[in-house]
Structure formats: C-alpha cells, structure tokens
Image (cartoon, rainbow, N blue to C red):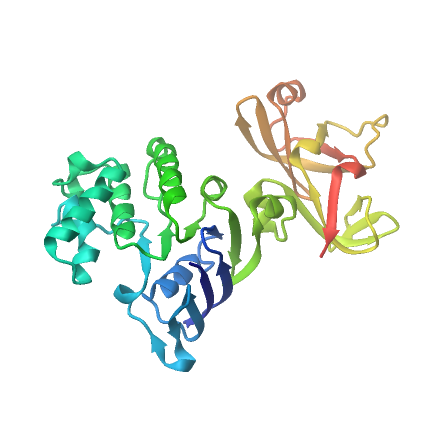
Amino acid sequence: MSLRATVAVIRGSFDLDVDLEVAAGEVLAVLGPNGSGKSTLLRSIAGLLPIDSGRVCVDTTVVDDPAAGVFVPPDRRPIGVVFQEHLLFAHLSALDNVAFGLRARGEPKKAANETALRWLDRVGLTEQARSHPGQLSGGQAQRVALARALATDPALLLLDEPLAALDASTRQEVRRSLREHLATFPGTRLLVTHDPVDAYALADRVAVLEDGRVAQQGSIAEVTAHPRSRYVADLVGTNLVRGTVADGVLVTTNGVSVAVAAEPGPVFAVIRPQAITLSISHDAGSSARNAWPGTVGDIDRLGDRARVGIEGSLPLVAEITTASLDQLALRPGDAVVAAVKATDISTFPV
C-alpha cells in the first residue's frame, strides 16, 4: 500500500503544484506555514477537491486523473480521513459515528456496529459508545474520529491537524495515544500539521510546503541538519545563512561576511544556536573568527536555557544558559556581540 500523488490545483491567486510519494507503512508529515497549501493538498488526495491536473494513485488504484477522465468519489476511495475539528455527527452516538462509513458502503447495521464496537474498544472508549459528541472531551472526540477513519480498513489514512483542536494539557496524552494507534495501522499515513513536535513524534519523514511547492523533504534528521529555507530553519530551531564562499569566507546577499570551512561556491551555512556565545563587547582574546554586533530582541526562557534573538545585519538566535543570561543582565534592546567559531558552522551546497 502506497501513495503517489502529483497534484496541481489553482484556486483564485493560489497555485498548488506538489509531487509526493509515500511508501507502504510510512508516516509522512506535511509541514508548512498557514496558506502554504497543506489542507488543499489533503483535500485533493481525499477527493474533496478535484485536481486540475496530475494523478493520484493509492497502491495500484488510480483515484484521480483528469487527463484520463478518472475521478473516484471520496466515499469510494480506499482512504480514511481524520479532520482537524473531528467533524463528528452531533446527532449520532460515538458508536453510530464510527459505524457510519461502514453503513454508507452498504454493510448491514449489525455487522457495522460490531466492527465499530471493536474499534471503540481499541481506542479505549467502549464505555462512551452511546455518548454523543457533545458529551465527549476533546481527546475522546479525536479518538472517535480516528476509529471512524480506521473502521473502513483504508489503504491510506489522512490526518489534517489532528491535535490542533486540543488544549495543551490534552495534546501530549492524545499524541502518545495516536502514535500507538498509527504504529498498528498497516497502511500508508499522511499527516498534515504546522507543529514540528507532531512531526518529530509521529512521522518517519517530512515534506515542507511553502507557497504551494515542496521546499524540502527527507527524514527529520536530514531536514534538521540541512534546512533549505528560513522557514525550515525557524521550524527546526537553527540559524540558516545563504551566500557565496570565496577564500574561506561566506558573503551573504546583504554583504555580511561569515568565516567558514567550506569549498568555494554558493552554500547554505547552519549555525546552531548553542554554538553562539554572547558578550557585551567583542572579546579580543576570543578564538572565534566570527563576531557580529547586534541588538537583543526576544528572550525566551526554557528551563535552565534561554533563547535570545539577535537583531542586526545577520539576524540570529543564540541559546545560552539562564545563568549566563543573568550574568550578562541582557534585556531587549541591549547592544550585544554574537560570536561563533568557523569550525562550528556546518555548510552544504545550494
């Protein structure tokens, strides 16, 4: 069971053109900022939004191919969908919600209910079988929606921001539960999310959408190590600099020089926040070849660490201990010097 999707959709001024492949048993997370096309992509694969051109193939079944005149309606596709807002039928019990897809495909009521009960038991909601959506917590509703999607035995499971509607206290528990259930699902899984934590916890591989295009895809480790855009760098929490190297110096488009250990040519440079040291003035005794003046922007304390935004000709995020932060007595608006050794900067070709 696999997914091969070439999806081209134009809606007004928005143009989506995406080519994705998800292997059997794999979980692919599609990440991207608001308006990047994540939900449009998912709706197109599900059949809720016909594509203008391209081809969607689930395993060996072509479900959408405008050039060939093929369009399989959503309810006839071997696809289960978990929506962001769950979209449970308010007038139906949890049992009837889970059985709905089976009944819609012609399965007798008794058999459909038996299957639905088994799924409610698997997600730990047997006692809520007769409860209506309004009587369920957010986490319980999410599990009913998952059971409904899986009850039809789909080849492909689509999850559209499945944890976004949950409060922070519930999200961690449901994320763990979702990971367990996804691990037992033998088909292909595609997860749409804006939260990198969801991707790290649930996915084998990620694809990043920006402006309707796949900006980058690969394993989480690959994308984290080699972010190819500012959005991806911000997403994975590192600093990304692009420029051209000559004689061991990278020069950015706005003329900032960065000493690196790299071959000549256009490159991306990744500067880990933990590799940056901060000082009030340049330390003449420092071994760091790179030192850039800037101004302190946002400061976020995370336990015993603090992430400090540096505004200037080379915007950066540094991560230091809270002890160092207090010792430097840094406040937003303070002048600061950010330094990093050339050997602590990773580079790779554009």
x then y, percent, for residue 267 = 74, 53
Pick the front one: 52 or 186: 186
Residue 171 is left or right of residue 13, and the answer is left
* Residue displayed at 79% across by 50% down: 250
Front residue of this view, candidates 164 and 338: 164
Quadrant of the image occupied by residue 106? bottom left
Can residue 118 be seen here? The reply is yes
Query: Image height check: is 7 above or below 35?
Result: below
User: If the image is split into quadrants, where does the N terminus sit?
Assistant: bottom left
> Is residue 41 positioned above or below 198 on the image?
below
Does the rendering let one see residue 332?
no
Q: Is residue 347 above or below residue 103?
A: above
Q: Position of residue 155 (x, y in %)?
A: 36, 57
Residue 260 lies in quadrant = top right
Q: Is residue 124 above or below residue 303?
A: below
Counting from the top left corner in percent of width and height, residue 220 is at: 56, 45
Residue at point 60%, 21% (across, down): 322
Residue sitting at x 60%, y 27%: 331
- In which quadrant is the C terminus drawn? bottom right
